Image (cartoon, rainbow, N blue to C red):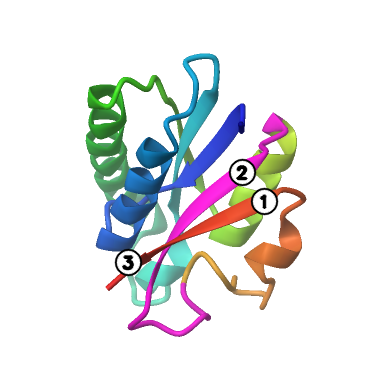
Amino acid sequence: MYQKILVAYNGSAESRAALQECIQLRPPGSAEIHLLGVVHLSAYGMAGGYAPEIVCTTKTQTMRQELDEGQALLVAAGLNPVIHLEIGEPVDVIGTLADRLKIELVIVGHSRRKTLAARWWRGDTDALLVERLGCSILVAVHG
């Protein structure tokens, strides 16, 4: 049984599917569950004349609300997640946090309607998440 699990979460239907997969695994009470939200600023068109600090603050607040909702779902299922809110390239952030915390399983969501170049899979630098991780990965498919 996995003792250290990281769930990538952004409030989307795909990431809610990842949360449900974590819940269905029924990790033991001693397991560490980490819920990660990544604010990916380049995904928000930083070159459009917006002040970076305003965009960052707004997107961080939105992600914090999404993480609070995800945390509530996990707590309702009897889990006690540790929340992480990071800014950066999702593939890099997930990989770095997984390494630092010695994560054994990363759970991400994926939509069949999107290509494998979706957010969690392929970063801005064309880095593949599955190649970046030194642990197992569970892909929760939605749609």
**Nearer mark to the viewer, of 1 and 3:** 1
Residue at image mark 1: 136
Tell me which amino acid carries mark 1.
Ser
Please check the rendered image and state whether residue 26 is part of the magenta-colored stretch, yes or no: no
Disc number for residue 105? 2
Q: Quadrant of residue 46?
A: bottom left
- Residue 48 on image: x %, y %: 34, 77
Q: Earlier in the sequence, mark 2 or mark 3?
A: 3
Q: At x 37% / y 79%, what residue is drawn?
A: 112
Tell me which amino acid carries mark 3.
Tyr
Residue at image mark 3: 50
Q: Secondary structure at mark 2?
A: strand
Front position in the image: 65 or 109: 109
**Within 10 angstroms of label 2, few (less than 14), some, or many (20 or more) residues?**
many
Q: CA distance from mark 1 to mark 3?
A: 38 Å
Q: At x 51% / y 64%, what residue is drawn?
A: 120
In-image side of 92 versus 120 (left or right)? right
Front position in the image: 115 or 61: 115
Q: Secondary structure at mark 3?
A: loop
Disc number for residue 24? none
Q: CA distance from mark 2 to mark 1?
A: 5 Å
Q: At x 34% / y 73%, what residue is drawn?
A: 49
Residue 98 makes an appearance in the image? yes
- Residue 130 on image: x %, y %: 67, 64
Task: Name the image quarter holding the C terminus.
Answer: bottom left
In-image side of 76 versus 138 (left or right)? left
Q: Earlier in the sequence, mark 1 or mark 3?
A: 3
Task: Name the image quarter holding the N terminus.
Answer: top right
Please check the rendered image and state whether residue 105 is part of the magenta-colored stretch, yes or no: yes
Q: Which residues are magenta?
A: 101-118
